[in-house]
Amino acid sequence: MRRLSLLVCLSLVPTAALTTGQSTATSLHSDTRIERTLSPAETHSYTINLERDQYLQLAIEQRGIDVLVRVFQPDGKLLRELDSSNGDEGVEQVEVIAEAAGTYRFEVSPLEDAETSAKGKYEIKVIALRKATAEELQIRKNVNIRKAKGLALLIETSQNLDQFHLPETRVAMQVRTALMLWPTDEKRASSLLTQAMDIVRQAIADDAGHDLDYQDFQTAMRMRSQVIEALAPHDPEAALKFFHATQVRGDSANQYGPDDPELQLESSLVNQVAAADPKRAFEMAEDMLKRSYSASLVGNLTHLAARDRTLAGRLAHDMAKKVKEPELIKNAEAAFLATSLLQTARASKGAKTDGDNTQPSGLLTDDEFRDLFLKVLSELLEYTRPEQNTYPPEYVAARNLASAVAQMTPEIKTYAADRANAAEKKIAEIMGPAGDAGGEWQRYQTAAATGPVETALESVQQAPLQMRDFLYQQVANRIASAGDIPRAQEIVADRITNATQRKQALNALQQQRVTSAAEKGNLEEALRLIGKFRPAERINLIGQILDRIGPDFKKSLALQYLEQARNLVTTSVRAEDAGQMVTLLAIARTLAPHDSNRSFQITEPLVDQFNEISAAAVTLNGFGQQYYTDGELITANENPVAQTADQLSDVLATLAMFDFDRARKVADGIVRSDVRLRVWLAIAERAMEIHLEPDESDGNYPAGQW
């Protein structure tokens, strides 16, 4: 996620309801330094008392886990969510200037969903606690003014959404605008969601009486999902009612594969409801369980366990009871649910909470777990693979059971030691014996990947002729990764016989020299190396430079390197092709925090050029590339006009953080209203320092992520 401004100011900022499932808050003081372990779906809470105009700086050092930090005001309203782009290592910096005296709360939680995140450690410490300086107070004032302008632009955008004519586009924009408005203007946000719901209902009603084709069905599902995800956190019952009222005809849903999209959408709704109302989520999951063996129920179980372990245990019990009924070999969906439940219940046995030596009970009792495991094992052992080389549905279910049992050797020894040999044979019969496939190839590849260089080269020389070029390249890549690029180039040049492969490999190594120089911070050397490539090849390499010039980079050097990078692309104020356009805008975005005026100088001529390109694309629409549908720019097919609009949106949203009025004026110069409104929304989102996840389902993304 993109790094936002770190200075948290306490007015004109979006608010939200308190989250549930929080840990008891720990008080912070001027000398606080605390290291803790953070588990999936766990939240740690901290508080500190601040006086008006007091400055606080916190540092959260991540040690193997990517954390999200939430800041709450004394009235309990959400002030900010923060996460930098440094992954699961590095430091999250939080700075607060208190506009009102009181107790401020900070929550630390894993960034990923409970199903995918891993346990890790972090350290939180108070770096500074003092009265804010006059300069810092002025920064706060400027930030508040910018946020007020962002809110005004957001409201103006909301009043112009009727300019979108495609139902799916208007719904996406209404939902996103509503999410941004909700904390400050719930009435207007609710109105926008109501309008979006009406559009979806009407679109589905218009198609009633006949099956939808694939594209129409996907569009309907996407619109419903957007509305439900926006509505569920605020009114779960209304979201559920809307879900049932807009269900697509069964034939339309079921013809697109075994995974029922209606059940997937319903499962997603259950997960959202679980965060605020675990009991209601449990009831919804139980209702789903009565109607299906959907594997998505395991995800619902995991989310519910993070909020209410007792209810999760009841759901797991009922799931185990249901999968006992069918013959798993003849019901692949039930087989997948049974094995997924086994693995989830198994993982739940060993969880511990930070600072607590108690061992919470598993999601299934020992007897339930044993009985379910034995059912899976028994059905696996009873299965006989067809003699013909065919793959009937029963074989798919059997492979699922075999794969699960193969990972549960301790359970075989505990519950069915007398059948261990039979299980091993059956797994080999279905999955194939381990280690047989590709033995010769694997032997040479292992030598190339791990052996001493000279030994590896000798081994490759003994390999079959058709393998050697690939293996030599593997050795060269390993040497280059270790830092000896000249030696890698020598191996490629002397030993790879295929001329095309040799040329490509040498070019890749030359690019790796650029990467190596950039990673070491030697940007001058990296730029010199980039200059040796053809102009068209420089485009992809310049990103290596931009990635390393952050807002904290020394200004004089940043300006020097970025100007050099720009001149390597072109010396003209206009781009010669789509690649140059995107790269010039990326340079302008990186320039913004160092010299916003220079960034504007690069961006403004490109806006004029974009208007020309947009007009030309109207004429060219359908001739080799689809740019527009019913007069609106398509943002989901990666056409060059949409890509340029994406970059323009990102640059102007970034520049609005430094000169809102000028960024707005440039955005107003975009001729096409559909693009201009998207850019307005991106500027408002960045100026108000709101973070919304991109809606990746249809390409309608915030700034920089269309």
Image: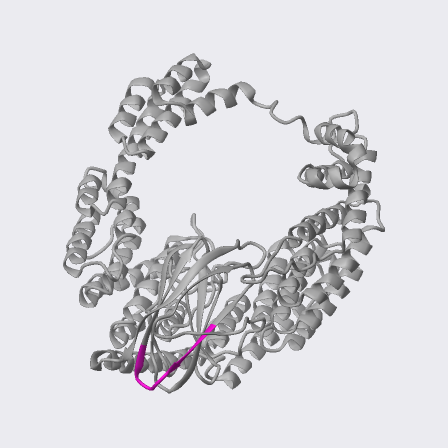
Q: Is-magenta flag for residue 50?
A: yes
The segment highlighted magenta reads: 46-55
Residue 617 placement, left or right of 349: left
Residue 673 placement, left or right of 422: left
Callout count: 0
Residue 204 placement, left or right of 127: right
The quadrant in which residue 558 appears is bottom left
Residue 6, image x and y in percent?
33, 69
Residue 532, image x and y in percent?
19, 37
Q: Nearer the viewer, residue 247 or 641?
A: 247
- Whether residue 608 is visible: yes
Residue 392, image x and y in percent?
76, 36
Q: Quadrant of the C terminus?
A: bottom left
Residue 667 placement, left or right of 335: left
- Whether residue 706 is visible: no
- Tell me which residue sits at (61%, 73%) in the image: 276
Above or below, comparing residue 194 to residue 592 in the picture: below
As drawn, the residue found furthest toward the front would be: 357
